[in-house]
Amino acid sequence: MRDTLVLNASFEPLSTVSLRRAVVLVLREKAVVEQSHPGLRVRAANVELPVPQVIRLCRYVRVPFRQRAPWSRRGVLIRDRHRCAYCGRRATTVDHIVPRSRGGEDTWLNTVAACSADNHRKADRTPVQAGMRLLSKPFEPTPGDALVLALGMRDGESLPEWLPMPASA
C-alpha cells in the first residue's frame, strides 16, 4: 500500500499515512492534496481525485517538539537505502561500528546497514580492526528527514521544491 506524507498546515512533516487514510482526510476536507502521483487517480461512484503523495492539513495541529528521530533497525536500513556500508550490495542487517559487546550502543551514529556476509566477516571487531572501510559515514536524521526517507524520496526527483530535503552523508 502506498504511503502518503502528511504535512501540518505550516508545511512541516508530521507523519505518513496509508493511501486510504489520506483519501478520507481529503474527502472530509481536513486536508488538501499538495502533490499527487502522476497519472494515477482514485475513482468512486461520485468522486474522482488524484492519488495523493503529499497532503497538507487544513488546520494547524500542535505537536510536542521532537528533537530527535527515534532509532530503529528499520530506520537505519531506510537511511542507508538498504545498501551495505562496506561493499554497497543489498543490506539486510544492521551492524554496530563499535560492537555492543565493547560498549557500542544502538544509536544513529554507531549503526550502519550491512549485508550478512560483511556483518559476519566484521564480527566482534571495529571496521579498522577488521580491515574494512565504510563507504558512507552514518548520520542522524531529523524527525522530518526520517519521514521523507521512509517514503523513499531521498533523491528529490518526485518532491516539490518547497519541501526541504534531508541532509545526506
Image (cartoon, rainbow, N blue to C red):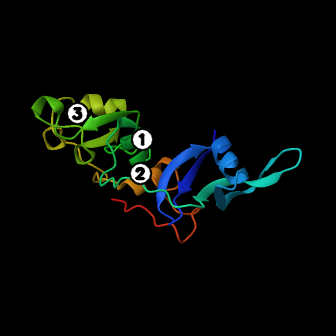
Circles 1 and 3, Cβ within 8 Å, touching? The answer is no
The residue lying toward the viewer, choosing from 169 and 26, is: 26
Circles 2 and 3, Cβ within 8 Å, touching? The answer is no
- Residue 157: percent from left, percent from top: 57, 63
Mark 2 or 1: in front is 2
Q: Amino acid at mark 1?
A: Arg
The residue lying toward the viewer, choosing from 130 and 104, is: 104
Q: Earlier in the sequence, mark 2 or mark 3?
A: 3
Q: Earlier in the sequence, mark 1 or mark 3?
A: 1
Disc 2 residue crowd, few under 14, some 14–19, many 20+, Cα 10 Å: many
Q: Which numbered dot is residue 146? A: 2
In the displayed structure, does residue 121 sit left or right of residue 25? left
Q: Amino acid at mark 2?
A: Ala
Taking the spot 29% from the left edge, 32% from the top edge, the residue there is 119
Q: Secondary structure at mark 2?
A: helix
Q: Is residue 91 above or below residue 148?
A: above
- Residue 113: percent from left, percent from top: 35, 40
Marks 1 and 3, how far apart at CA:
15 Å
Q: Which numbered dot is residue 132? A: none
Q: Which numbered dot is residue 89? A: 1
Is residue 80 in view from this perspective? Answer: no
The residue labelled by disc 3 is 122
- Residue 97: percent from left, percent from top: 21, 41
Q: Is residue 114 above or below residue 39?
A: above
Q: Amino acid at mark 3?
A: Lys
| Residue 37 figure quarter | bottom right
Q: Is residue 120 above or below residue 47?
A: above
- Residue 14: percent from left, percent from top: 47, 53
